[in-house]
Image (tube, rainbow, N blue to C red):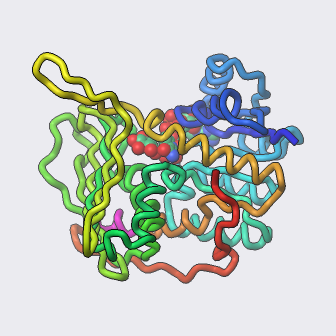
Amino acid sequence: MSVRIGVIGTGAIGKEHMKRVEQRLSGAKITAVTDVNPAAAEEALHELGIKANFYPNDQALIDAEEVDAIFVTSIGPAHEATVRKAIEAGKYVFCEKPLSVTAKGCKTIMQDEMEYGKRIVQVGFMRQFDKGYEQLKQAIDSKVIGEPLMIKCAHRAPEVDAAYTTDMAITDTLIHEINILHWLLADNYVSVQVLYPRKNKHALPHLRDPQVILLETESGVLIQAEVSVNIKYGYDIQCEIVGEEGIVSLPETESLKIRHNGKQSTDVLQDWKVRFQDAYDKEIQVFINQVAKQEALQGPSAWEGYVAAVTSDACLKAQESGQREPIELESMPAFYSTERKVQLL
Ligand SMILES: NC(=O)C1=CN([C@@H]2O[C@H](COP(=O)(O)OP(=O)(O)OC[C@H]3O[C@@H](n4cnc5c(N)ncnc54)[C@H](O)[C@@H]3O)[C@@H](O)[C@H]2O)C=CC1
Ligand SMILES: O=C1[C@@H](O)[C@H](O)[C@@H](O)[C@H](O)[C@H]1O
Protein backbone atom coordinates (compact mmCIF):
# COMPACT_ATOMS: atom_id res chain seq x y z
CA MET A 1 0.00 0.00 0.00
CA SER A 2 1.28 3.47 -0.84
CA VAL A 3 0.47 5.70 2.11
CA ARG A 4 -1.52 8.74 0.98
CA ILE A 5 -0.42 11.81 2.92
CA GLY A 6 -2.20 15.10 3.47
CA VAL A 7 -0.04 18.07 4.48
CA ILE A 8 -1.40 20.82 6.73
CA GLY A 9 0.91 23.84 6.53
CA THR A 10 3.06 24.15 3.42
CA GLY A 11 5.73 26.55 4.68
CA ALA A 12 9.44 25.82 5.13
CA ILE A 13 9.33 22.39 6.71
CA GLY A 14 6.03 21.38 5.11
CA LYS A 15 7.70 21.75 1.72
CA GLU A 16 10.82 19.91 2.88
CA HIS A 17 8.77 16.93 4.03
CA MET A 18 6.68 16.96 0.83
CA LYS A 19 9.88 16.93 -1.20
CA ARG A 20 11.43 14.05 0.74
CA VAL A 21 8.26 11.95 0.44
CA GLU A 22 8.07 12.52 -3.30
CA GLN A 23 11.75 12.48 -4.20
CA ARG A 24 13.74 10.45 -1.69
CA LEU A 25 11.59 8.15 0.42
CA SER A 26 9.52 5.15 -0.53
CA GLY A 27 6.02 3.89 0.18
CA ALA A 28 4.07 7.16 0.21
CA LYS A 29 2.82 10.02 -1.89
CA ILE A 30 1.38 13.46 -1.21
CA THR A 31 -2.29 13.51 -2.20
CA ALA A 32 -3.67 16.55 -0.37
CA VAL A 33 -2.55 19.91 0.99
CA THR A 34 -3.99 22.82 2.89
CA ASP A 35 -2.65 26.07 4.30
CA VAL A 36 -4.37 29.11 5.83
CA ASN A 37 -2.54 30.93 3.08
CA PRO A 38 -3.75 29.11 -0.07
CA ALA A 39 -1.06 30.85 -2.14
CA ALA A 40 1.61 29.07 -0.06
CA ALA A 41 0.05 25.70 -0.85
CA GLU A 42 -0.23 26.51 -4.51
CA GLU A 43 3.37 27.68 -4.60
CA ALA A 44 4.59 24.54 -2.83
CA LEU A 45 2.81 22.25 -5.30
CA HIS A 46 4.09 24.26 -8.23
CA GLU A 47 7.67 24.47 -6.96
CA LEU A 48 7.85 20.74 -6.25
CA GLY A 49 5.88 19.65 -9.30
CA ILE A 50 3.41 17.69 -7.16
CA LYS A 51 -0.15 17.03 -8.26
CA ALA A 52 -2.24 16.97 -5.08
CA ASN A 53 -5.64 18.37 -4.21
CA PHE A 54 -6.04 21.56 -2.20
CA TYR A 55 -8.53 21.52 0.70
CA PRO A 56 -10.00 24.66 2.30
CA ASN A 57 -9.08 23.73 5.88
CA ASP A 58 -7.57 21.04 8.13
CA GLN A 59 -10.88 19.30 8.88
CA ALA A 60 -11.77 18.94 5.19
CA LEU A 61 -8.32 17.49 4.46
CA ILE A 62 -8.44 15.12 7.42
CA ASP A 63 -11.88 13.86 6.34
CA ALA A 64 -10.80 13.30 2.73
CA GLU A 65 -11.07 9.69 1.58
CA GLU A 66 -7.77 10.03 -0.31
CA VAL A 67 -5.83 10.74 2.91
CA ASP A 68 -4.46 7.92 5.11
CA ALA A 69 -2.09 9.99 7.23
CA ILE A 70 -1.52 13.63 8.09
CA PHE A 71 1.57 15.81 8.36
CA VAL A 72 0.98 18.74 10.72
CA THR A 73 3.53 21.32 9.65
CA SER A 74 1.65 24.50 10.46
CA ILE A 75 2.92 26.94 13.12
CA GLY A 76 3.26 25.62 16.70
CA PRO A 77 0.14 27.21 18.24
CA ALA A 78 -2.04 25.58 15.53
CA HIS A 79 -0.82 22.00 16.12
CA GLU A 80 -2.98 20.96 19.06
CA ALA A 81 -6.37 21.55 17.45
CA THR A 82 -5.37 19.82 14.21
CA VAL A 83 -3.81 16.80 15.90
CA ARG A 84 -6.97 16.32 17.96
CA LYS A 85 -9.09 16.38 14.80
CA ALA A 86 -6.81 13.78 13.18
CA ILE A 87 -7.08 11.45 16.19
CA GLU A 88 -10.85 11.94 16.25
CA ALA A 89 -10.94 10.81 12.60
CA GLY A 90 -8.65 7.85 13.41
CA LYS A 91 -5.90 9.02 11.06
CA TYR A 92 -2.20 8.63 11.74
CA VAL A 93 -0.49 11.95 12.35
CA PHE A 94 3.09 13.13 12.16
CA CYS A 95 3.20 16.46 14.01
CA GLU A 96 6.17 18.80 13.90
CA LYS A 97 7.45 20.07 17.22
CA PRO A 98 6.03 21.41 19.46
CA LEU A 99 3.15 18.94 19.78
CA SER A 100 1.34 21.74 21.59
CA VAL A 101 2.72 24.98 22.98
CA THR A 102 1.42 24.00 26.44
CA ALA A 103 1.63 20.88 28.61
CA LYS A 104 -2.14 21.11 29.07
CA GLY A 105 -2.59 20.82 25.30
CA CYS A 106 -0.26 17.81 25.12
CA LYS A 107 -2.15 16.13 27.93
CA THR A 108 -5.43 16.52 26.07
CA ILE A 109 -3.83 14.97 23.00
CA MET A 110 -2.55 12.03 25.07
CA GLN A 111 -6.01 11.52 26.54
CA ASP A 112 -7.52 11.50 23.04
CA GLU A 113 -4.92 9.04 21.80
CA MET A 114 -5.36 6.73 24.78
CA GLU A 115 -9.12 6.77 24.26
CA TYR A 116 -8.55 5.92 20.62
CA GLY A 117 -6.54 2.96 21.91
CA LYS A 118 -3.51 2.90 19.62
CA ARG A 119 -0.46 5.13 19.26
CA ILE A 120 -1.10 7.06 16.05
CA VAL A 121 0.82 10.28 16.84
CA GLN A 122 4.53 10.78 16.11
CA VAL A 123 6.25 14.03 17.06
CA GLY A 124 8.97 15.60 14.89
CA PHE A 125 11.84 15.18 17.35
CA MET A 126 14.15 14.20 14.51
CA ARG A 127 17.38 14.46 16.48
CA GLN A 128 16.66 10.98 17.86
CA PHE A 129 17.34 9.79 14.29
CA ASP A 130 20.58 11.76 13.87
CA LYS A 131 23.70 9.61 13.64
CA GLY A 132 25.74 11.85 15.95
CA TYR A 133 23.13 11.83 18.69
CA GLU A 134 22.72 8.05 18.30
CA GLN A 135 26.46 7.73 18.90
CA LEU A 136 26.20 9.98 21.97
CA LYS A 137 23.38 7.79 23.31
CA GLN A 138 25.45 4.63 22.81
CA ALA A 139 28.39 6.26 24.60
CA ILE A 140 26.24 7.28 27.57
CA ASP A 141 24.46 3.92 27.80
CA SER A 142 27.73 1.99 27.65
CA LYS A 143 29.08 4.20 30.49
CA VAL A 144 32.30 4.79 28.60
CA ILE A 145 32.67 8.13 30.42
CA GLY A 146 31.10 6.90 33.66
CA GLU A 147 27.90 8.61 34.79
CA PRO A 148 27.14 11.97 33.14
CA LEU A 149 27.63 14.96 35.45
CA MET A 150 27.32 18.10 33.31
CA ILE A 151 26.24 19.05 29.81
CA LYS A 152 27.09 22.12 27.80
CA CYS A 153 25.16 22.55 24.60
CA ALA A 154 24.32 25.25 22.07
CA HIS A 155 21.60 25.81 19.47
CA ARG A 156 22.80 28.56 17.17
CA ALA A 157 21.25 29.99 14.03
CA PRO A 158 22.43 32.88 11.84
CA GLU A 159 19.16 34.85 11.96
CA VAL A 160 15.42 34.71 12.56
CA ASP A 161 12.56 36.73 11.09
CA ALA A 162 10.44 39.35 12.87
CA ALA A 163 7.75 36.81 13.79
CA TYR A 164 10.21 35.04 16.13
CA THR A 165 9.57 36.12 19.72
CA THR A 166 11.40 35.62 23.02
CA ASP A 167 9.17 32.70 24.10
CA MET A 168 9.92 30.90 20.82
CA ALA A 169 13.54 30.55 21.92
CA ILE A 170 11.99 27.96 24.24
CA THR A 171 8.94 26.54 22.43
CA ASP A 172 10.48 26.46 18.96
CA THR A 173 14.24 26.24 19.47
CA LEU A 174 15.25 24.88 22.91
CA ILE A 175 12.45 22.30 22.62
CA HIS A 176 14.88 20.18 20.56
CA GLU A 177 17.50 20.23 23.35
CA ILE A 178 14.81 19.55 25.96
CA ASN A 179 13.74 16.44 24.09
CA ILE A 180 17.10 15.11 23.00
CA LEU A 181 18.82 15.53 26.38
CA HIS A 182 15.91 13.80 28.13
CA TRP A 183 16.21 10.98 25.58
CA LEU A 184 20.00 10.78 25.98
CA LEU A 185 20.02 10.80 29.76
CA ALA A 186 16.70 9.03 30.47
CA ASP A 187 16.56 11.36 33.46
CA ASN A 188 13.72 13.78 34.26
CA TYR A 189 14.24 17.51 34.65
CA VAL A 190 13.53 19.00 38.06
CA SER A 191 14.28 22.72 37.70
CA VAL A 192 15.19 25.48 35.29
CA GLN A 193 16.52 29.01 35.33
CA VAL A 194 16.85 31.34 32.33
CA LEU A 195 19.57 33.99 32.11
CA TYR A 196 19.95 36.76 29.56
CA PRO A 197 23.53 37.67 28.65
CA ARG A 198 24.34 40.96 26.94
CA LYS A 199 22.01 41.35 23.97
CA ASN A 200 23.25 40.59 20.46
CA LYS A 201 23.12 43.85 18.45
CA HIS A 202 21.71 41.89 15.49
CA ALA A 203 18.60 40.85 17.45
CA LEU A 204 15.43 42.84 16.71
CA PRO A 205 14.27 45.14 19.55
CA HIS A 206 11.46 42.83 20.71
CA LEU A 207 13.72 39.78 21.09
CA ARG A 208 15.86 38.66 24.04
CA ASP A 209 18.78 36.94 22.35
CA PRO A 210 20.95 35.11 23.32
CA GLN A 211 19.49 33.15 26.23
CA VAL A 212 21.16 30.71 28.60
CA ILE A 213 18.98 28.00 30.07
CA LEU A 214 20.17 26.11 33.14
CA LEU A 215 18.42 22.80 33.67
CA GLU A 216 18.87 20.32 36.48
CA THR A 217 17.85 16.65 36.36
CA GLU A 218 16.61 14.29 39.03
CA SER A 219 20.02 12.59 39.32
CA GLY A 220 21.73 16.00 39.57
CA VAL A 221 23.10 16.48 36.05
CA LEU A 222 23.53 20.22 35.40
CA ILE A 223 22.85 21.42 31.87
CA GLN A 224 23.86 24.75 30.39
CA ALA A 225 22.06 25.32 27.10
CA GLU A 226 22.71 28.36 24.93
CA VAL A 227 20.15 29.58 22.41
CA SER A 228 21.57 32.18 19.99
CA VAL A 229 19.47 32.89 16.94
CA ASN A 230 21.23 35.91 15.43
CA ILE A 231 24.78 34.69 15.58
CA LYS A 232 25.50 35.29 11.88
CA TYR A 233 28.35 32.78 11.39
CA GLY A 234 26.13 29.76 10.77
CA TYR A 235 23.78 27.04 11.99
CA ASP A 236 25.66 25.23 14.68
CA ILE A 237 24.47 22.54 17.08
CA GLN A 238 26.89 21.62 19.86
CA CYS A 239 26.67 19.19 22.75
CA GLU A 240 29.39 18.16 25.18
CA ILE A 241 28.74 15.71 27.99
CA VAL A 242 31.13 15.64 30.93
CA GLY A 243 31.15 12.35 32.79
CA GLU A 244 32.94 10.91 35.81
CA GLU A 245 35.79 9.56 33.70
CA GLY A 246 35.74 11.45 30.44
CA ILE A 247 33.99 13.71 27.99
CA VAL A 248 31.95 12.87 24.92
CA SER A 249 30.90 15.40 22.28
CA LEU A 250 28.48 15.49 19.37
CA PRO A 251 30.56 14.94 16.22
CA GLU A 252 31.13 17.97 14.02
CA THR A 253 29.35 17.83 10.66
CA GLU A 254 31.34 16.46 7.77
CA SER A 255 33.32 19.11 5.96
CA LEU A 256 36.45 19.30 3.85
CA LYS A 257 39.47 20.59 5.68
CA ILE A 258 41.14 23.20 3.48
CA ARG A 259 44.63 24.59 3.90
CA HIS A 260 45.03 27.68 1.75
CA ASN A 261 46.71 31.08 1.91
CA GLY A 262 48.31 30.34 5.24
CA LYS A 263 45.01 29.26 6.80
CA GLN A 264 43.36 25.95 7.66
CA SER A 265 39.55 25.96 7.48
CA THR A 266 36.36 23.86 7.50
CA ASP A 267 32.85 25.03 6.53
CA VAL A 268 30.11 25.75 9.06
CA LEU A 269 26.64 24.81 7.83
CA GLN A 270 24.15 27.65 7.34
CA ASP A 271 20.87 25.80 7.42
CA TRP A 272 18.91 23.35 9.59
CA LYS A 273 17.52 21.69 6.44
CA VAL A 274 20.98 20.44 5.53
CA ARG A 275 22.21 19.68 9.05
CA PHE A 276 19.38 17.27 9.81
CA GLN A 277 18.45 16.06 6.34
CA ASP A 278 19.26 12.39 7.05
CA ALA A 279 17.47 12.49 10.39
CA TYR A 280 14.32 13.97 8.80
CA ASP A 281 14.46 11.30 6.09
CA LYS A 282 14.67 8.55 8.69
CA GLU A 283 11.92 9.85 10.97
CA ILE A 284 9.49 10.19 8.07
CA GLN A 285 10.42 6.82 6.53
CA VAL A 286 9.84 5.14 9.91
CA PHE A 287 6.44 6.86 10.12
CA ILE A 288 5.49 5.76 6.58
CA ASN A 289 6.60 2.16 7.19
CA GLN A 290 4.57 1.85 10.36
CA VAL A 291 1.48 3.50 8.89
CA ALA A 292 1.67 1.13 5.91
CA LYS A 293 1.49 -1.78 8.35
CA GLN A 294 -1.17 -0.03 10.45
CA GLU A 295 1.03 -0.59 13.51
CA ALA A 296 1.06 1.32 16.78
CA LEU A 297 3.72 3.97 16.18
CA GLN A 298 7.04 3.71 18.00
CA GLY A 299 8.76 6.96 17.02
CA PRO A 300 8.82 9.98 19.39
CA SER A 301 5.46 9.91 21.14
CA ALA A 302 2.83 12.30 22.44
CA TRP A 303 4.25 11.51 25.89
CA GLU A 304 7.60 12.90 24.76
CA GLY A 305 5.74 15.92 23.41
CA TYR A 306 4.21 16.29 26.87
CA VAL A 307 7.53 15.96 28.73
CA ALA A 308 8.97 18.64 26.46
CA ALA A 309 5.97 20.91 27.00
CA VAL A 310 5.99 20.59 30.80
CA THR A 311 9.63 21.62 30.65
CA SER A 312 9.02 24.45 28.23
CA ASP A 313 6.12 25.75 30.38
CA ALA A 314 8.59 25.97 33.30
CA CYS A 315 11.21 27.62 31.06
CA LEU A 316 8.68 30.27 30.02
CA LYS A 317 7.89 30.93 33.67
CA ALA A 318 11.62 31.19 34.38
CA GLN A 319 12.03 33.65 31.49
CA GLU A 320 9.56 35.93 33.27
CA SER A 321 10.56 35.42 36.90
CA GLY A 322 14.33 35.25 36.57
CA GLN A 323 14.09 32.61 39.32
CA ARG A 324 14.80 28.91 39.36
CA GLU A 325 11.45 27.24 38.60
CA PRO A 326 10.47 23.66 39.47
CA ILE A 327 9.58 21.15 36.76
CA GLU A 328 7.01 18.58 37.81
CA LEU A 329 6.08 15.69 35.56
CA GLU A 330 3.14 13.38 36.05
CA SER A 331 3.95 9.69 35.83
CA MET A 332 3.99 8.09 32.42
CA PRO A 333 0.82 6.18 31.50
CA ALA A 334 1.51 2.48 30.74
CA PHE A 335 0.11 3.16 27.24
CA TYR A 336 3.35 5.01 26.41
CA SER A 337 5.77 2.68 28.16
CA THR A 338 6.31 0.11 25.41
CA GLU A 339 9.94 -0.30 24.46
CA ARG A 340 10.77 0.42 20.84
CA LYS A 341 10.64 -2.86 18.98
CA VAL A 342 11.35 -1.57 15.52
CA GLN A 343 14.89 -0.77 14.57
CA LEU A 344 14.26 2.86 13.69
CA LEU A 345 16.27 2.40 10.44
N1 LIG B 1 11.95 19.60 13.34
C1 LIG B 1 12.56 20.66 12.86
O1 LIG B 1 13.77 20.73 12.82
C2 LIG B 1 11.78 21.82 12.38
C3 LIG B 1 10.52 22.02 12.84
N2 LIG B 1 9.80 23.09 12.46
C4 LIG B 1 8.47 23.25 13.04
O2 LIG B 1 7.52 23.13 11.98
C5 LIG B 1 6.46 24.05 12.15
C6 LIG B 1 6.39 24.95 10.91
O3 LIG B 1 7.58 25.69 10.83
P1 LIG B 1 8.02 26.39 9.46
O4 LIG B 1 7.72 25.53 8.32
O5 LIG B 1 9.40 26.85 9.68
O6 LIG B 1 7.04 27.64 9.47
P2 LIG B 1 6.51 28.49 8.23
O7 LIG B 1 6.01 29.75 8.81
O8 LIG B 1 7.53 28.51 7.15
O9 LIG B 1 5.29 27.63 7.69
C7 LIG B 1 4.11 27.45 8.41
C8 LIG B 1 2.97 27.34 7.40
O10 LIG B 1 1.79 26.98 8.11
C9 LIG B 1 0.73 27.81 7.65
N3 LIG B 1 -0.27 27.86 8.71
C10 LIG B 1 -0.29 28.61 9.82
N4 LIG B 1 -1.36 28.31 10.58
C11 LIG B 1 -2.03 27.34 9.92
C12 LIG B 1 -3.21 26.61 10.20
N5 LIG B 1 -3.93 26.84 11.29
N6 LIG B 1 -3.61 25.67 9.30
C13 LIG B 1 -2.90 25.45 8.17
N7 LIG B 1 -1.78 26.11 7.86
C14 LIG B 1 -1.34 27.04 8.73
C15 LIG B 1 1.37 29.14 7.29
O11 LIG B 1 0.57 29.87 6.40
C16 LIG B 1 2.68 28.67 6.68
O12 LIG B 1 2.58 28.44 5.28
C17 LIG B 1 6.76 24.80 13.45
O13 LIG B 1 6.07 24.16 14.49
C18 LIG B 1 8.26 24.62 13.64
O14 LIG B 1 8.66 24.65 14.97
C19 LIG B 1 10.29 23.98 11.55
C20 LIG B 1 11.53 23.83 11.03
C21 LIG B 1 12.41 22.74 11.42
O1 LIG C 1 13.10 23.37 14.52
C1 LIG C 1 13.81 24.08 13.88
C2 LIG C 1 13.39 25.41 13.39
O2 LIG C 1 12.17 25.77 13.99
C3 LIG C 1 14.38 26.49 13.60
O3 LIG C 1 14.08 27.57 12.79
C4 LIG C 1 15.81 26.05 13.40
O4 LIG C 1 16.71 27.02 13.81
C5 LIG C 1 15.96 24.76 14.18
O5 LIG C 1 17.16 24.45 14.62
C6 LIG C 1 15.17 23.71 13.53
O6 LIG C 1 15.54 22.44 13.94
Where 224 falls versus 2 (above or below)? below
- Residue sitting at x 58%, y 65%: 106
Q: Which residues are magenta?
A: 313-319
> x, y percentage for residue 343?
66, 58
> Which residue is drawn at the image coordinates 79% and 28% (left, top)?
53
- The quadrant where ligand 2 appears is top left
Q: In the rendered image, is residue 213 in sight?
A: no
Q: x%, y% of residue 145?
A: 31, 70
Question: Quick one: quadrant of the N terminus?
Answer: top right
- Count the labels in the image: 0
Evaluate whether residue 273 shows in this view. yes
Residue 203, compared with residue 122, is above or below; it is above
Instruction: Determine the image quadrant of residue 122.
Output: bottom right
Task: Tell whether 89 sits left or right of 236.
Answer: right
Q: Residue at x 46, y 73 (%)?
A: 186
The residue nearer to you, when weighing 112 against 121, is 121
Q: Quadrant of residue 81?
A: bottom right
Picture coordinates of residue 147, whole percent (x, y): 33, 76
Magenta highlight on residue 204: no
Type of secondary structure dominating the magenta stretch: helix
Q: Identify the residue at image location x=72%, y=68%.
A: 112
- Position in image of residue 14 (x %, y %): 60, 36
Position of residue 308 in the picture relative to residue 4 (left or right)? left
Q: Nearer the viewer, residue 230 or 290?
A: 290
Quarter location, residue 236: top left
Horizontal relation, residue 122 to residue 305: left or right: right
Between 328 and 291, the residue placed more toward the observer is 291
